C-alpha cells in the first residue's frame, strides 16, 4: 500500500507563499520530477482552484496535471489516474466529492492507486476522504460525521485549530461514541500514514 499524507490546512490552496507541505509531498514520491495530479472535485472543479494549483506546482520540480470530472479531459480515467506518482485531492464539499467519485468509478480507481505505488495526499475534504469517517461541513451550517473511503482506519478532523467549532465537535462526538477514534489535524500540519 502507498503512503497517505493528510493535511489539516495549509498547502498551496491556503498558503500560496509557503509551499513547504507541497514540497514535502513531492519529496515523498521518491522520484525525479514526479507526476502529480490535482483532483479538484470537492470544489466542483472550481477553475480558480485549478489555476492556484498550477501557479504553485509549475514552480516546483514536478509534472503537474489535473482531473476535472465535470468536463473530463479523458475517457479512460483509470489509465490517466494510475499513471501518476501523486494524487493530490483538494478541499471543498466531501459529500458531493464522494458521490461524484462513486458515480464515475473513481473511488475504485483510487483504491487501486492506494494498493499500488501511488502516493495519496489531500487537504480538508482531501484529507478526511481516505479515512473510515471524518468531520465535515458538507451540510451548510453544521459539522457532522461522514463515512468516507475507509482506506485508513479511524476518523479525521481537519482544521482542528483553525475553525472554532472543529475541536469541541470532534471531542463531543468522540466522548459520545458517535465517531470512531481518530486524529485532529491542525492547519500547517500533516498526518502521514
Image: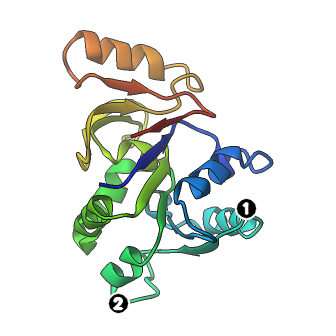
Which residue is depicted at the point 36% across and 40% down? 139
Q: Residue 122: give x, y in percent of width and height.
A: 48, 50
**Distance in Å between CA atoms under marks 2 and 1:** 27 Å
Is residue 63 in sight in this rendering? Answer: yes
Question: Residue under circle 2?
Answer: 75
Q: Disc 2, disc 1: CB below 8 Å?
A: no
Question: Residue under circle 1?
Answer: 56
Between 7 and 138, the one lying in front of the other is 7
Which residue is depicted at the point 26% across and 60% down? 115
Residue at the extreme left of the image, as rendered? 177
Is residue 44 in sight in this rendering? Answer: no
Q: Which mark is residue 145?
A: none
Q: How crowded is mark 1: few (under 14 residues within 10 Å), some or many (20 or more)?
A: some
The type of colouring in the image is rainbow
In what element is the residue under mark 2? loop
Q: How crowded is mark 2: few (under 14 residues within 10 Å), some or many (20 or more)?
A: few
Q: How many marks?
A: 2
Which residue is depicted at the point 39% across and 43% down? 138
In this rendering, is residue 102 above or below 134? below
Residue at the extreme right of the image, as rendered? 17
Between 149 and 5, the one lying in front of the other is 5
Between 59 and 89, the one lying in front of the other is 59
Q: Residue 3: give x, y in percent of width and height.
A: 40, 50
Instruction: Answer with the quarter of the image where residue 60 lies.
Output: bottom right
Whichever of callouts 2 and 1 sits on the residue coming sooner in the sequence is 1
Q: Residue 1: give x, y in percent of width and height.
A: 29, 54
Which of discs 2 and 1 lies nearer the camera? The answer is: 1
In what element is the residue under mark 1? helix
Judge left or right: residue 177 versus residue 152: left
Amino acid at each position: 500500500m502507498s503512503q497517505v499524507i493528510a493535511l489539516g490546512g495549509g498547502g498551496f490552496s491556503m498558503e500560496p507563499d509557503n509551499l513547504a507541505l507541497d514540497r514535502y509531498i513531492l519529496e515523498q514520491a521518491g522520484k525525479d520530477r514526479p507526476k502529480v495530479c490535482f483532483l479538484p472535485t470537492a470544489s466542483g472543479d472550481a477553475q480558480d482552484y485549478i489555476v492556484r494549483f498550477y501557479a504553485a506546482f509549475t514552480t516546483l520540480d514536478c509534472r503537474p496535471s489535473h482531473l476535472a470530472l465535470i468536463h473530463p479531459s479523458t475517457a479512460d480515467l483509470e489509465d490517466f489516474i494510475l499513471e501518476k506518482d501523486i494524487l493530490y485531492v483538494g478541499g471543498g464539499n466531501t459529500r458531493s466529492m464522494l458521490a461524484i467519485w462513486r458515480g464515475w468509478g473513481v473511488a475504485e480507481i483510487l483504491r487501486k492507486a492506494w494498493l499500488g505505488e501511488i502516493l495519496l495526499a489531500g487537504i480538508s475534504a482531501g484529507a478526511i476522504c481516505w479515512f473510515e469517517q471524518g468531520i465535515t461541513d458538507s451540510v451548510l451550517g453544521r459539522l457532522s460525521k461522514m463515512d468516507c473511503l475507509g482506506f485508513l482506519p479511524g476518523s479525521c478532523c481537519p482544521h482542528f485549530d483553525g475553525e472554532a467549532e472543529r475541536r469541541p465537535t470532534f471531542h463531543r462526538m468522540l466522548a459520545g461514541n458517535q465517531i470512531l477514534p481518530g486524529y485532529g489535524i491542525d492547519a500547517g500540519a500533516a498526518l502521514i500514514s
